[in-house]
Image (spheres, rainbow, N blue to C red):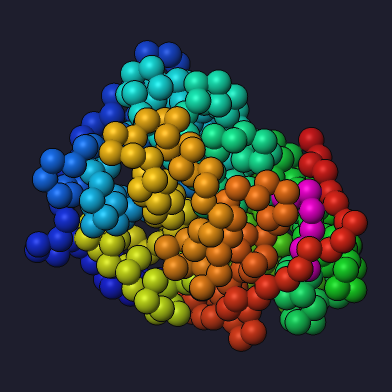
Amino acid sequence: MIRGRKRILGVAAAGAVALLVTAAGCGGSSGSGGGGGGNASGPAGNKTITVGILTDITGPAASGNKTSVDGVKAGVVYAARNGYNIKYVVGDTLTTPDGALSAAQKMVTQDHVLVVIAHSALAFTAANYLTAHKVPVVGMAEDGPEWITAKNMFSVVGPLQQTKVATTIGKFLKMQGVTNLASIGYSVSPLSSEAALSAGESAKAAGVKVGYLNAKFPFGSTDVGPTVLAMKQAGVDAFTASVDPNTTFALITGLRQQGVNLKVALSPTGYGGDLEQAGPGALSAAQNVYFQIGYEPIELQTAATKQFQSDLKAAGVTAAPSYATYNGYAAIGLLVRGLKGAGANPTQASVITSLSGIHDWDGLGLFGGRKVDINDRENVVGGAGNCTWIMKLEGDKFTPVKGATPICGDVIPGVTVAPQS
């Protein structure tokens, strides 16, 4: 249950690793942001590692990204258990290019972070700066191609080649009896635009018509009236939206108000905590919607998900985990893997060298026994095994979809897409 999972995660238990919260001051330049900081006590004498979290705390992309901080908090607990003290500072991008760059500059020049954890729709606007300063970046490849080209950047799901297309989404749509798909993506985010186009190509490969395609939707907008009418006119019976939860739920509500009967509404965001934060009416709007997640959902209660929940609880996180929460947790897990190979006194160069040698990352077990080569910058399309876990919201429960937890695919030879702007 959505509400019930808050109780499951609970609050920090006695004897759990404590978090010391500090304030991260704001930088002097306009657009820079600060947030909470934290560390966890590991074995005595261990050196503290300072990391910066570059994420969208405010602005249009906040609904899908700000909970990455909760994941980092749980990751700090994991790191302490493995002998590393992690202190973090938060840089709010404000969901603007200037904000992202200013936050990154503050992390380098004032906070002196060893590593940046990036979970932002606009991380690509700070990527050149971080690369020029040879700062290792670990996070989620959700924004642009810098995760492929910049050798100091390491995505927790691999450097996604979203110009290539996998059969996974089309396979699921066909399974659900879809005949006519609408696919939506943001113009400002290259990966969002590519994901919308890729979903369309995957559907075509499965024999599903693509009646409406818009890979240039305004970033973060909930003004969906014209789009809804166009989708209705196209006769779609399904849609997938590679956008933030606020846009997705606005589209779903609009389609229902227009009497459009959808067999499938599929969203890569909105699972778990995202839905809780989406505001009044979100639970109603999300009924019978299918949600993707690139990790084992906590509803499966595997060994890895139980450990994830335990670390969230120890960190004092009471909200249900979202996709961003998973990514923040995995980012610290990957950083710890890198630190183990970076020497007793890790430097930015030694961390990059260590991370560059990882070819068998398992997402702290949350990939369901699969692994991804985080340094394969040519062939990773949909994460580990091109797999996704699909859940359906029924009442206030996320229910695993039969045959789709996970559902995996293959790369379609010769089919590519390019972002629209």
Q: Nearer the viewer, residue 32 or 379?
A: 379
Residue found at x 28% / y 39%: 344
- Which residue is pictured at 27% across the width and 71% down the height? 7
- Of residues 211 and 140, the one nearer the viewer is 140
Q: Nearer the viewer, residue 210 or 335?
A: 335
Q: Identify whether 174 is placed above or below 325.
A: below
Q: Is residue 95 visible?
A: yes
Q: Is residue 287 visible?
A: no
Q: Quadrant of the N terminus?
A: bottom left
Q: Dividing the image into 4 quarters, which one contains the C terminus?
A: top right
Residue 78 in the image: state x and y as whole percent.
29, 56
List x then y, in percent, for residue 225: 74, 51
- The range drawn in magenta is 161-167
Residue lying farthest bottom? 402
Decide: is 10 above or below 148.
below
* Up/down of 235 relative to 357, above or below: below
Query: Residue 172: horizontal and vertical position, in percent?
Result: 73, 75
Q: Position of residue 212 (x, y in %)?
A: 85, 58
In this view of the protein, which residue sits in the foreground, 51 or 371?
371
Q: Is residue 129 above or below residue 221?
A: above
Seen as rendered, the residue at the extreme top is 28
Q: How many marks?
A: 0
Which residue does the image show at 46% across and 42% down from the upper left?
354
- In the image, is residue 378 part of the stretch drawn in magenta? no
Quarter of the image for residue 61 reads top right
Q: Quadrant of residue 199?
A: bottom right
Residue depicted at x 67% and y 65%? 386
